[in-house]
Image: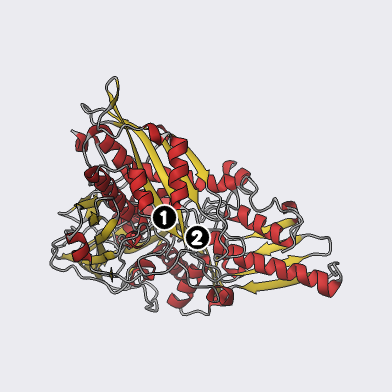
Amino acid sequence: MTTLHPTSIGAASPRLEAREKVTGHAMYAVDRPMPGAVYAWPVQAAFAHGRVAAVQTEAALGIDGVLAVLWHGNAPRLEPGDDPQMLVLQSPEVAYYGQVVALVVATTLESAQEGADAVVVRAEVQPADTVLRADHPDLYEPETVNAGYPGRLETGDFEAGFGVADVRIDATYRTPIEHHNAMEPHAATAFWERGRLVVYDATQSSTTMRDTLAALFELPPQLVRVHNEHVGGGFGGKGFPKPTAVLAAMAARLVGRPVKLALSRTMLFAMVGYRTPTIQRVRLGADAKGRLLAIGHEAFAQTSRLTEFTEQSAVISRVLYGAPNHTSRHHVVRLDVPTPTVMRAPGECPGSFALESAMDELATAGNWDPVQLRIDNDTDRDAEGLPFSSRHLVECLRRGAEAFGWSGRDPRIGSRREGRWLLGTGVASSTFPAITWPSTATARATADEHFHVAVNAADIGTGARTVMRQIAADALGVPTHCVEITVGDSAIGQAPVAGGSMGTSSWGWAVTKACLALRERIDREHGGRVPPEGISVGADTTADIAARGDYSRHAFGAQFCALRADPRTGEVRIDRLLGVFAAGQIINPTTARSQLIGGMTMGVGMALTEQTILDPRTGDFVTSDLASYHVAVNADVPRIDIEFVPEDDPHLNPMGSKGIGELGIVGTAAAVANAVYHATGIRVRSLPITPAALL
Ligand code: MOS
């Protein structure tokens, strides 16, 4: 590739839309002024299992401004597809507490809310089963788990390897229900225009949302357009289609006006997904020198009556270390609860808490240094036997240990004190798959030497459009200011979700391909001059991705934590986090660093404060706002340092990039828990580490 401006990839560049956002000019899903727009407000089921016997709407319809009440008796019919969660207001059956059972549409938000309060729902309620247990009689082993991994993997003979090990750990870890809590709630504006459906949706994929709406309303996809120019955070919560846009579109069809629907914070807890609680049994067996002979990881998760979604929590044990004998299995149970979904680093995030806590327990039991134990169990193949395309976990651990000052560590528990505080340090490894999915992109040159590049990326606060412009400029060989970038519109063309940490690699490959093709056409067919009418080129990476070699592609990292704990109050204060990551070519160190700091910050919340409590008597989430669900706030977040280990991987994509959106949260909670153990001698195997856990 001719690169006249080699600084565009790898340049620390601020976000293009930063000013728009901080000045309040960025338009999110329901922000756009729209003449004649009306408002919708849901009515939720106040029981977890049963059916709606009657919906009484007369009182609501009598309220000034109320235009309609949708319920299963009068709502537009939807075409059933493969996700029953989308079939809102289609049947009287209720599968979880908080499921939408009616939708009030009114000329003002206030009258819609008043109308919702006036709707009377008569129900036939059945007993509900809402609690995950490892001995639940209805547990089963799914064939595949989220992201398509086989539910079960066995290599060698786990029981034999574990049986002859000199040092063994057999421990069970728990993680609670967690909620994404993006700043922008799930929200949508929808209107119909001469048979076409137009939606502004808070989604991580306007392509998928467009296809979903088209299927539900039996429309050709080209008659549906989904915009998501700005999205106020996702964390996976907006990764799969959500009913918000469906409800808004149904209501808009019924009342013949644009409808705005923004869920309240409390509604989000039941209506748009969460991270399953997990129970994870990890068994590790090592020889006398600290070489793993057997790795066993068994994960239990819940799903709903509607859809099977199984978090892939044991998959990380197929990747992080090598052992001749391996078993990893998943169990799931259908409960009367909402369907869980992907949340930042699904699988690897809860899985790393279990595996990396167990590695720390193994280090203690064998009297080995936790960093060295990890280095000694590095591997060049995953448990399925595939070679890694690149892997610099050892380099991350070494560099991290050096930068953190690990070598001076006294491994004895509580060996360092400062007044009322016991000080401790801990380490954990990180990893996340480097995924690339097919995408399209277009590049257009105008006669005045300007370039317009369009790719249906979703910028969920990550800086996606900023790095897409850098990638485009690099491939075109022009300065970034010559490139205009458009994202966030299903009309641009097919592109994968801003999820699975695959965005930059997937969209960036299509952008690179389109830009290189455009450059070549300008040079070859037009002698380096753009004709007055301009030139346009489209690209699709489906075949390129299919042609890649068979490798296990993952980013890696090492996290170090220094903290203090007060054994009398149970208070934990983190002093410092250090993350060293190897994630291929870093396109933009500024936005990359922010992603990793963000991930580690979310990891601090996971470690110390975040948990959603479900009331088993009702199936309702009792923590359902930011006052009761504690995300890490500024005062909880310590100094976080990020370093990158340079990595050149030819088996990924033209940019050589791996994803970084999820890598940062993987391992953080274990690093914290391991440091808590070092400080206090208390091994907390159940998150979060509340003060009560240390008393
Ligand atoms: Mo991420 S949980 O795949 O948005």
Classify 10 Å Cα crowding around label 1: few (below 14), some (14-19), many (20 and above): many
Q: Is residue 358 visible?
A: yes
Of the pair 422 and 691, the residue shown nearer to us: 422
Circle 2: element type: loop
Q: Amino acid at mark 2?
A: Ser
Q: Of all residues shown, which one is farthest toward the front? A: 289
Spatial separation of the CA atoms under disc 2 and disc 1: 12 Å
| Residue underneath mark 1 | 431
Placement of 584 over or under 212, stated as above or below: above
Q: Quarter of the picture for ligand 1?
A: bottom left
Give the left or right position of residue 517, taking residue 147 as reference. Answer: right
Placement of 134 over or under 576, stated as above or below: below
Q: Give x and y (percent) for residue 642.
A: 50, 42
Give the left or right position of residue 577, taking residue 424 as reference. Answer: right
Visual colour scheme: secondary structure
| Residue underneath mark 2 | 390
Q: Give x and y (percent) for residue 399.
A: 47, 42
Image quadrant where residue 343 sits:
bottom left
Nearest to the eye among marks 2 and 1: give it. Answer: 2
Classify 10 Å Cα crowding around label 2: few (below 14), some (14-19), many (20 and above): many
